[in-house]
Amino acid sequence: MLGWALIFFLLAIIAGYFGFFGLAGMAAGIAKILFLIFLVLLVVSFIARAFQGRSVL
Protein backbone atom coordinates (compact mmCIF):
# COMPACT_ATOMS: atom_id res chain seq x y z
CA MET A 1 0.00 0.00 0.00
CA LEU A 2 2.86 2.35 0.76
CA GLY A 3 4.26 1.79 -2.73
CA TRP A 4 0.95 2.74 -4.33
CA ALA A 5 0.65 5.82 -2.12
CA LEU A 6 4.11 6.96 -3.20
CA ILE A 7 3.37 6.35 -6.88
CA PHE A 8 0.16 8.34 -6.77
CA PHE A 9 1.85 11.02 -4.68
CA LEU A 10 4.42 11.47 -7.45
CA LEU A 11 1.67 11.54 -10.08
CA ALA A 12 -0.12 14.25 -8.10
CA ILE A 13 3.09 16.28 -7.88
CA ILE A 14 3.59 16.03 -11.66
CA ALA A 15 -0.04 16.95 -12.35
CA GLY A 16 0.32 19.83 -9.91
CA TYR A 17 3.39 21.11 -11.72
CA PHE A 18 1.51 21.28 -15.01
CA GLY A 19 -1.63 22.68 -13.43
CA PHE A 20 -0.02 25.36 -11.29
CA PHE A 21 1.86 26.83 -14.24
CA GLY A 22 -1.22 27.35 -16.38
CA LEU A 23 -0.90 24.41 -18.76
CA ALA A 24 -4.16 22.90 -17.60
CA GLY A 25 -6.50 24.87 -15.35
CA MET A 26 -8.65 21.96 -14.32
CA ALA A 27 -5.60 19.79 -13.61
CA ALA A 28 -4.56 22.21 -10.86
CA GLY A 29 -7.71 21.55 -8.85
CA ILE A 30 -7.45 17.81 -9.35
CA ALA A 31 -3.76 17.85 -8.44
CA LYS A 32 -4.43 19.73 -5.21
CA ILE A 33 -7.07 17.20 -4.21
CA LEU A 34 -4.88 14.22 -5.15
CA PHE A 35 -1.92 15.72 -3.34
CA LEU A 36 -3.89 16.06 -0.12
CA ILE A 37 -5.51 12.63 -0.41
CA PHE A 38 -2.25 10.80 -0.99
CA LEU A 39 -0.39 12.82 1.61
CA VAL A 40 -2.99 11.69 4.13
CA LEU A 41 -2.71 8.09 2.87
CA LEU A 42 1.07 8.25 3.26
CA VAL A 43 0.83 9.47 6.84
CA VAL A 44 -1.82 6.87 7.68
CA SER A 45 0.33 4.09 6.24
CA PHE A 46 3.34 5.30 8.26
CA ILE A 47 1.26 5.27 11.43
CA ALA A 48 -0.25 1.84 10.67
CA ARG A 49 3.20 0.33 10.06
CA ALA A 50 4.54 1.92 13.25
CA PHE A 51 1.74 0.34 15.31
CA GLN A 52 2.46 -3.02 13.70
CA GLY A 53 6.07 -2.74 14.83
CA ARG A 54 7.58 -2.76 11.35
CA SER A 55 10.07 -0.28 10.02
CA VAL A 56 8.50 2.77 8.38
CA LEU A 57 10.94 2.97 5.50
Image: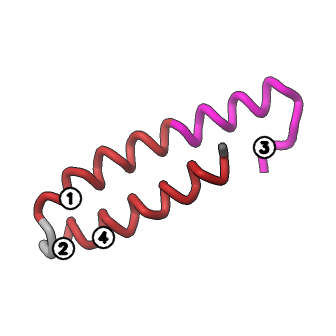
Q: CA distance from mark 2 to mark 4?
A: 6 Å
Which label was assigned to residue 21? 2
Magenta span covers which residues? Answer: 41-57
Residue 55 among those drawn in magenta: yes
Q: In the rendered image, which residue does mark 3 sit on?
A: 56
Q: CA distance from mark 4 to mark 3?
A: 28 Å
Q: In the rendered image, which residue does mark 1 sit on?
A: 28
Label 1 vs 2, first from the N-terminus: 2
* Place of residue 21 in the rendered image (x, y in percent of width and height, measured from the top left): 18, 73
Indicate the quadrant containing the N terminus: top left, top right, bottom left or bottom right. Answer: top right
Q: CA distance from mark 1 to mark 4?
A: 8 Å
Mark 1 is surrounded, within 10 Å at the Cα level, by few (under 14), some (14 to 19) or many (20 or more) other residues, namely: many
Q: How many marks?
A: 4
Residue 50 among those drawn in magenta: yes
Mark 3 is surrounded, within 10 Å at the Cα level, by few (under 14), some (14 to 19) or many (20 or more) other residues, namely: few
**At label 2, which amino acid type do we have?**
Phe
Pointers 2 and 4 in contact (CB under 8 A)?
Answer: yes
* Place of residue 12 in the rendered image (x, y in percent of width and height, measured from the top left): 39, 58
**Which residue shows up at 11% across the image and 63% down it?**
25
Mark 4 is surrounded, within 10 Å at the Cα level, by few (under 14), some (14 to 19) or many (20 or more) other residues, namely: some
